[in-house]
Structures are given as structure tokens and as C-alpha cells.
Image: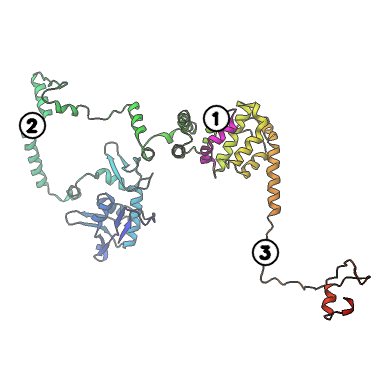
Amino acid sequence: MALNIDRGNADPFYRYKMPRLVAKVEGKGNGIKTVIVNMTEVAKALSRPPTYPTKYFGCELGAQTQFDSRNDRYIVNGSHTDEKLQMLLDGFIKKFVLCLECSNPETNLVVHTKRGTIHQRCTACGYDCLVDMGHKLTTFILKNPPDQDPAAVTAILNKGKRSKKEKGKKEDEKEKDHTSSESTPTSGQDKMAVLRESGNMMTLLPSNTGGGDGGGDDDDDDWGDDCTEEAVNKRIGELTDAARGLAFTDDLEKSADERLNVVYEMIKIKRDEDELTKMAVIKSLFSEAERLEVKDKVPLVLVDLLLNDKALVQLLKYKNVFLKFCAQNTKAQKTMLGGLQILLAVEYPELMCKTSHFLKALYDLDILEESVILEWARKPSKKYVSKEQSAKIQKEAHAFINWLEQAEEETDEEDVEIIYSNTQKCQDITVEPVKPQTSSASVVNGNKKPASTSADIDDNDDIDIDDI
């Protein structure tokens, strides 16, 4: 049965699979050992040498390990169950396989033997970091890099079993090969060394700059990419939004103000190009602000760049931009109110008398919620402007705040809840007779007679002929 490489990921469509570990216990007493039958298949799914997880088991269990790549046997001393080893394998995957940034198993280990460091580089997102160098397995990895042949690993591990006679023979053979190779230079580098020692001059072939023979080799002269800052920025600009998000940049290492300034420049360019009314542009700006983790502060930039003394008209024009950043985001709405305070108190003080109009427009456009406005109006704040200016703005907005509070009270009174219960006992119902209404008297044969009521008609079914 195949398992997810990242067993913490329960996605049914997760495409990175590995076979379940199969362990077989052999021997008795002090010679008991556990053979991992399918370690080669598991290691292949993880893109790691099979010796690494086997050695990891030995480090975690405090047991000796044995490798025999020719016979495909990877052994851990002691008796261990499949489940126990599978749990240990999850720890190995977490520390030495999964990317710390995107949790993708498409990673490679880069070993710097001289420096004594091991880097894990993700081919999916480009993240590069050091592995946990405090683990005992790192010592084994430094001595046995991933690109080393498994057969060579076995030979190195079994090196102590060779006899001194065999070592001496191999050393003699190496010396003979070395002397023969020195006598006849084969590579271009060796030939150049011989020429330098002899004192002869070395001439370089002229490069083919024009046409003629060999013109097809001109393409090989400029095979590298231009790594200047201008060229890199040009290539990043040509990427799509999705690819730009995956590109490895150091934007997140900058301060919050620097990241906000990046979004400021982007919005300014789109405003000058009159593209801030297009939903595709708005979505791309929002994605970039979200990537840079400054989306809650962007309303300050929007107020600064998009609103002036004609703010009421401009709010209607750029409604979708403000809605994208402020809708269902309390922090962004509070920032929007801070930007409005700066607009009214610092940039255009003559518009302060229209504070209620601005708040009403923002409320009607669903940019600001009622609860946020009422919370803002409770106490002056000195976060964006001085406390005196904040109090003055709130005083100008008093009419709108009162209207909001009264509307809230009316809705509370109108919301009367009627509860119907099947178990509640009804009170006794009393029936009272209906009193007959007095009507004007009618004249019959010159005599006044009170008009008959419906009750009289019901009591006397017979009609007196003399009354007609």
C-alpha cells in the first residue's frame, strides 16, 4: 500500500507517494537483527540513498547498522516492528527531505565537505537552507555525499576487512598508472603545462567575429545569462503573476516600510496608466500586497495616491480598489479611517467640515462597517494625527455617528422575536356577549319604532303582518 511521503498531509490527491516499510526480524538472542526488505524502493521514492534512512534508524535507536547494496540488504541490529520504523522514517522525512518553506519533497542535499555544511535546496520553490547539523546523521552524510556510488559506500565501509597485501598491490598499480600518465600528456591542460615548462609561446586562435567558415560557432560565445541588476529586473518583469510569486527574492527580508513602498510604486504606476478600474489589475495588486504581508496597511497608500479635494467623486471611481482591500478586514478599515484623518487634518483641512459626508459615502459603499465606525468614534487616537485633531474630526462626524446609533436602536426595537411553544399552557378564555348597537328609529304607519336588531330577528322567527 502506498503512503503519502508527508503523512501529515491528508489531501487525497497528494501525488508524492512511497511504499510502506517492510521489516523482517532475523536471528535470536544477541544476534537478532531487523532487515528492511524494501529500503531501496522507499529511498528511491524519497530521492535519497538507502543508507541515509537506515543510518538514521541506527542513530535514533542507538543500534548498529549494516549495508550490503549488492545483495540489497539494509540491517538494523535488534528487533523492531514495521510501525516503529515507519514513525522514525517520518522524522527522517521531516528533517532531511521536506522543504521547510513549501513542504514539498522535491529537494536535493548539497554537501560542502570542506566547509562541513549540508544545504537542502528545493527545486519547487527555490528555498535554500541548512539542515539540522546537530543530528548525528550529518556526520555520516558529510563522509558519504549523495552523489557517491552505493557500491563505493559498501567498499569504504568494508575497508577494514581488506588485507595489507591487497592494499600494497593496489598502491603499486596506482603508482604505475600515475607515472605512465605523467610521461604522456593527454589533456589540454597538461599540454599547456608542458609548453610553459619548455618556454615555448602559446598562441590563441583568432575568434570568428565575421562571416566565413565556422560562423555557426558564434552562438556558443554568449551562452551565459546576463546577471546584472537591470537584466534580472527585466526578466522578473516578464514573468507572470503566479511565476513571480514563486521566484526567490529577498523582498520579505526588507522592513515593513520598504515593502509598503514597493506596493506604493506599483499603485502609482497603475494610477498614472489609468488601470486601477480593471479587476485583473486590482487582483494582481492585492496578491502582491498579500505576498509582501502589507495588505492591512495598503489603504493608507490608496488614500494618499487616489484621494484629494474631490474625494467624494474619486471614492465612486475607485470603489473596487478600496473594497478589495477593506471588505471583511477590520484592520484595513481602521487603517482607512487613519488615512481619512490624515487627509482631513493635514492635507485638506478645509474639508474637515464634510467629515460626515465622507463617512456616509464610505458606509454606503460598504467600504467601512458600522461597528468599526462606532468603535473609532468612542475615543480620540493619536496614532495618525494629533489627539486634538482627532477629537476635532470626531466632533465634525457627530451628526453621522448619532444617526448610526439611532438607526441601531430602532433596529433593536423592531427586532421582536415571537417564540411558539407546543408545551406552554394557554390561559382560560372568557367569552363575553356582544352588546347590540343602537340605531336610529324607523317610522312605520306614522309611528316611530326602534329598528330591529339582528338579535331580535334571530329570537323572533315569525313576522307580524300588522307591522307591514
Residue 230 at x, y percent in the picture: 35, 26
Q: Where's the N terminus, which quadrant?
A: bottom left
Mark 3 element type: loop
Vertically, is 461 above or below 364? below
- In depth, the one of 266 and 434 nearer the eye is 434
For label 3, the crowd category at 10 Å Cα-Cα, with few meaning under 14, some 14 to 19 and many 20 or more, is few
Residue at x 73%, y 72% (from the top left corner): 426
Residue 381 at x, y percent in the picture: 64, 35
- Look at the image and name its color scheme: rainbow
Residue 315 at x, y percent in the picture: 56, 35
Q: Where's the C terminus, which quadrant?
A: bottom right
For label 2, the crowd category at 10 Å Cα-Cα, with few meaning under 14, some 14 to 19 and many 20 or more, is few
Q: Amino acid at mark 2?
A: Thr
Give the residue at mark 2.
186
Separation of marks 3 and 1 at Cα, in angstroms: 52 Å
Residue 315 within the segment the image draws in magenta? yes
On the question of residue 387 being in view, the answer is: no
Vertically, is 425 above or below 124? below
Give the residue at mark 1.
304
Give the residue at mark 3.
419
